[in-house]
Image (cartoon, helix red, strand yellow):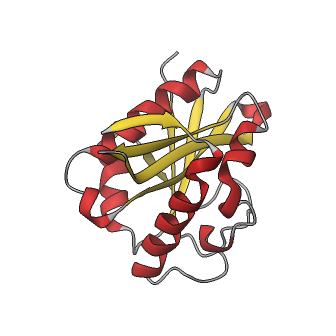
Amino acid sequence: MHLHLITAADDAAIAAIIRACLADAGLDRPGTAYFDPELDHLSRYYQAAADRDYYIATHRGTVIGGCGFAEYDRAAGIAELQKLYLLPAARGHHYGHQLLTRVETAAAAAGWQQLYLETHTALAVAIQLYAHAGYTRLPGPLHAGPHTSMDHFYLKPLAP
């Protein structure tokens, strides 16, 4: 697997992967990333600020997934882990863990002190990944946000 920062050339492939993964989990509905307004142009969103990034995972030249981070609560030093999705064929090879580790390292380097994330019960493999990676489950969201269908919330301090 190879990781690189998202470019406009990656936008269509990663949007399709995210939508397919959400649809497979029955989450192709309002209140999820499926309907995020920036989903078809993620490169523009992540390149618009110096303290956010999105990494694309490729295998043999094909986009297989991605993951990123962006500001969530600047005053508290919290960024949000965003849109960690992999094609079904790419799962089970530790690619999710590699993506997560890369994003955590980049978020810490960008000055963030913690990563927050929202996910759903239907994404059980992701929940296992977050628990294994040291994320602590919270009783609810830190703030009200657009992803109202999410029902699991996690926070992790980042190493300086």
Left or right: residue 59 versus residue 121 is: left
* Residue 156 drawn at (x, y percent): 49, 37
Please name the residue shown 46% across and 74% down the image: 20
Choose top left, top right, bottom left or bottom right for residue 90: bottom left
41 with respect to 91 (left or right): right
Residue in the foreground of this view, choosing between 120 and 67: 67
Which residue is at the front of the view, 143 or 47? 47
Residue visible at 30% across and 62% down in the picture: 125
Image-based side of 105 in relation to 143, left or right: left
Whether residue 64 is visible:
yes
In the rendered image, residue 37, in percent from the top left (x then y), is placed at: 75, 66
- Vertically, is 7 above or below 126? above
Residue 131 in the image, given as x and y percentages of width and height: 34, 49
Task: Name the residue at the left extreme.
Answer: 92
Q: Position of residue 78 (x, y in %)?
A: 66, 36
Q: Quadrant of residue 51?
A: top right
Q: Is residue 14 above or below residue 150?
A: above
State the residue at coordinates (56%, 43%). Answer: 68
Is the residue 4 above or below the residue 138 in the image?
above
